[in-house]
Amino acid sequence: MDVKFDHLATGPLLLICVGAIAALLFLILKVKMHAVVALTIVSLGTAFVARIPNAEIMDVLLGGLGETLGDIALLIAFGVMFARLIEFSGGTKVLVDALVDKLGEKRAPLALGIASLVFGIPIFFDAAFLVMLPLYLGVARRLGGSMLLYVLGPTAALSMMHMMMPPHPGVTTASVLLGADIGLVMLFGLAVGALGWYFGGHLLGAWMGRRLVLPIPEAFSGGPQVDEPYTPANRADSHTPGETDGTGGSPAAPAASGSGGTATDVKTRVAPAAKAPSVPTLLALICLPLVLILLNTGSTMLARVGVFDEDAAWVALLQVIGSTSIALLITVVTACYVLGARRGAAAVLLEDMMDSSLKPIASVLLVVGAGGMFAAVLETSGIGDALAGTIDASGLPLPAALFLICAIMSAAVGSTTVSVTTAAGLMGSAVAAADLNPVQLAALVLVMAGGSGILPHVNDAGFWLMSRLLGMTVTETLKTWTVVKTMIGVYAALFASVIYVIASL
């Protein structure tokens, strides 16, 4: 939110930033205050101390909260519904069995990571994470051991593609502002991203996963895990009165008259021949939102360069159905039929099951939104701009200066796009004056992209998404996700800097 007021000097702003983060960690880790309450208190206090006008403080707080939830609330809701549908049908077990049988148990984390690199190219991190998380947890449940062994590395792959590959907003914005060739950025970004992920994400994530053993959370799937698809043996008429249906639904109840007198809970009546869905069916459902989002991205880019008419009705339609939230909505509706109604599950059962899947995520949504509120206060206060200006005046080499600006902005305000936009704006004239060749420009964009992933912590919505959905404490998330994402950013920036140096010879 753009609020006009006289910002404090760099020194006081830096102290405010450090103090705010320290206070937040103290309240959460030592006082054991709920994250939503702590984030709200610290956000309000930071706004007062940074001298944001009193009349604007609530607008800043609610603006940050609303903007963050507007971007992510439907993604999380539809994502957990889709995950619950796959697990409910026995599909998770089918996918896990196929993956492990073909690739072997030892290579499962690497296989998940490579698949995530592919899925992460066209899809924003939040959406891709929610689609892929059931598969990660399914493999962890099948093979045993720590959940993090099968989650950290693959999730780092999704994050790396979000940072390094157009059409994701941060790297695309940097490319446009610096005048870099998008094709070269994509080519080098894929190579740099894959190498950076392998060393900083896969190897480090696997090492951490073996050292820190955490249980698999049940909250994400909305209830107890289902390891067997629905069959005649687990139909409701096998229950005695007073038993639950095993899916988190209501106890069995007598059927209405005319049903033959069988004691059957209408919520759990399924077809006698119901079998787990096939692997091609499940892969098609998983790929459906990815394809829709890719159609949106592709049609938008081609329309902007004049290949298609930007005002054509079919282009607008693709943009709507390919928006992330709508693509996931279409996927949930399709999955309800394919995994539910077509296999004989009653509509009331599907409704009850999806309703139960939403209950565990209330805290997740509030914490993520409160994290966005804190980030908005930090951005509005001018902390990031003050620090970036200091780096700009330091006389450092271009790659180092751009990396540091992006890293500081990322640590200060928790936004990839804000980080690279600030760095490109501050250093744009210096980059233009250097008369760089296309390869050097592409390399600088990737250096910035690597810097934009540094030190995600309590001001980053993705940090809270990882923490709450995986059932990790703030300390555990700082020790794992913050370190892994920082390392993939550092490795990516180092490899991009090597390209820059070689192109300068």
Image (spheres, rainbow, N blue to C red):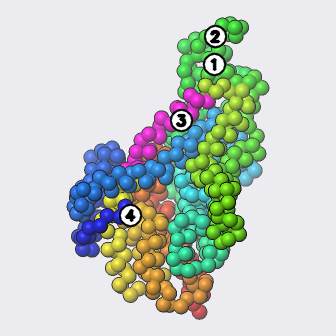
Q: Which residue is mark 3?
A: 357
**Residue 256, label in figure:** 2
Q: Which residue is mark 1?
A: 266
Vertical relation: 149 (above or below) 9 = above
Name the residue type under label 1: Val
Residue at x 55% of width, y 13% of height: 242
Residue type, label 3: Ser
Tell me how far mark 4 sits from mark 2, CA to CA.
Answer: 58 Å
Instruction: Please state which of residues 29 and 134 is positioned toward the viewer in this rendering.
Output: 134
What quarter of the picture does the C terminus occupy?
A: bottom right
Residue at image coords 73%, 30%: 343
Cβ atoms under marks 3 and 4 closer than 8 Å: no
CB under 8 Å between discs 4 and 2: no
Q: CA distance from mark 2 to mark 1?
A: 9 Å
Q: Element under label 4?
A: helix
The kind of secondary structure element at disc 3 is: helix
Q: Position of residue 298 (x, y in %)?
A: 67, 63
Relative depth, front residue between 312 and 420? 312
Marked residue nearer the N-terminal end (1 or 3): 1
Please tell me the numbered disc located at residue 40: none
In the rendered image, residue 157, in percent from the top left (x then y), is placed at: 59, 60
Label 2 crowd (10 A; few <14 / some 14-19 / many >=20): few
Which mark, residue 413? 4
Q: Amino acid at mark 4?
A: Val
Q: For the residues marked 3 and 4, what is the alpha-carbon distance in whole angstroms?
A: 31 Å
The magenta region covers: 350-370
Q: Is residue 473 magenta?
A: no
